[in-house]
Amino acid sequence: MTGDRPSWAPESIDLDRPNAARIYDYLLGGAANFEQDRVFAEKLLEVMPLARSAARLNRAFLRRAVRFCVESGIRQFVDVGSGIPTAGNVHEIAQAVDPAVRVLYVDNEPIAVTHSELLLNDSPHAAAMRGDLTDPDPVLASPLIDWSQPVAVLMVAVLHFIPDSAAPYDAVAKYVSAMAPGSFLVLSHGVENPSLAGRDEVERLYRQSSNPGVRRTPDDITRFFSGLDFVEPGLVWTPEWRPESPEDVGAHPESSLVFAGVARKP
Ligand SMILES: C[S@@+](CC[C@H](N)C(=O)[O-])C[C@H]1O[C@@H](n2cnc3c(N)ncnc32)[C@H](O)[C@@H]1O
């Protein structure tokens, strides 16, 4: 892929601007990205070398959180801002425990949706749809999910691409109100850190992409969980969320750049 449109790239995608889904795919070692995404990601790594490990640690949080939800009895997942499929997708983790678990992937980036559909061709209990986090109704109407039963809604590393002007708090609240008691919200979000080296350069870079980032403090992030009870250990750096070994956390969990939490609807 050198800027020419490959056969799998839908006509509707904007090839001229780097995009969060494809930049993240490149950081994770994926192949569903274009020249301008790779150039962007390399510039990002120059000003913020931690970006690649932050992406991996975020993904590791997602895996642990999905396992936690399945072990807590959840049998249906909605992954909003799911991204381009990569190692350890939600249905792979959850269906390894129970093949009947249902998973709905939602993303507003057409390549993420096309790749998810290809991957899910043979999966009767999983589906992908194009949708926007800020427009919950089409997702809430999907026949794959029974909202009268507990569900885990994942919003992992997506809300920091949605400015307050697009009303993300209202959208999350709408999901939360649709969720049955015993459901979980699984969320991670980049954290505002004024002393972080390269922070302004990163913001400048992202302004040229299709997904300019948003700065939110831990208090701002906590507000997304309104009406829910945090499960232990609450809102923490991604590697601190139920690590599988002390080495997972390391000496500098803050270098993960991202806060994460899981909360239950009472
Ligand atoms: C950094 S990736 C995270 C992917 C995955 N959730 C993970 O944590 O591994 C962010 C994803 O959010 C998607 N996204 C950004 N804004 C969105 C929106 N308003 N609605 C739905 N998806 C969105 C992007 O297309 C991208 O795939």
Image: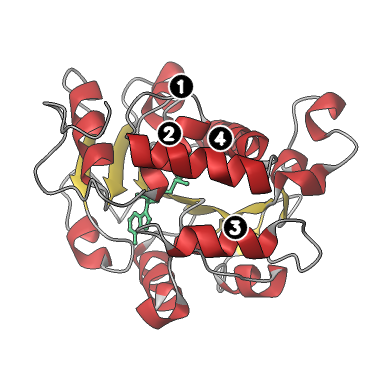
- The residue labelled by disc 3 is 202
- Tell me the amino acid under the disc marked 3: Val
The vertical placement of 161 against 88, above or below, is: below
Q: Compare residues 265 and 206 and report the one nearer the observer.
A: 206
Give the mark, 4 or 1, whose residue is nearer the N terminus: 4
Q: Is residue 83 visible in the rendered structure shown here?
A: no
Which numbered disc, 2 or 3, marks the residue closer to the eye?
3
Q: Compare residues 76 and 109 and report the one nearer the observer.
A: 109
The span from disc 4 to disc 1 (Cα, nearest Å) is 9 Å
Determine contact: label 4, label 1, CB under 8 Å.
Answer: yes
Q: As drawn, which residue projects farthest toward the bottom?
A: 165
Determine contact: label 3, label 4, CB under 8 Å.
Answer: no
- Tell me the amino acid under the disc marked 2: Asp
Label 4 within 8 A of ligand 1 by Cβ? yes
The span from disc 1 to disc 3 (Cα, nearest Å) is 26 Å
- Point 34% across, 30% down: residue: 101
Is the residue marked by circle 2 packed among few (<14), some (14-19), or many (20+) residues within 10 Å?
many
Which corner quadrant holds the C terminus? Answer: bottom right
The vertical placement of 98 against 63, above or below, is: above
Name the secondary structure under disc 1.
loop
Give the mark, 3 or 4, whose residue is nearer the N terminus: 4
- The residue labelled by disc 1 is 87
Name the secondary structure under disc 3.
helix
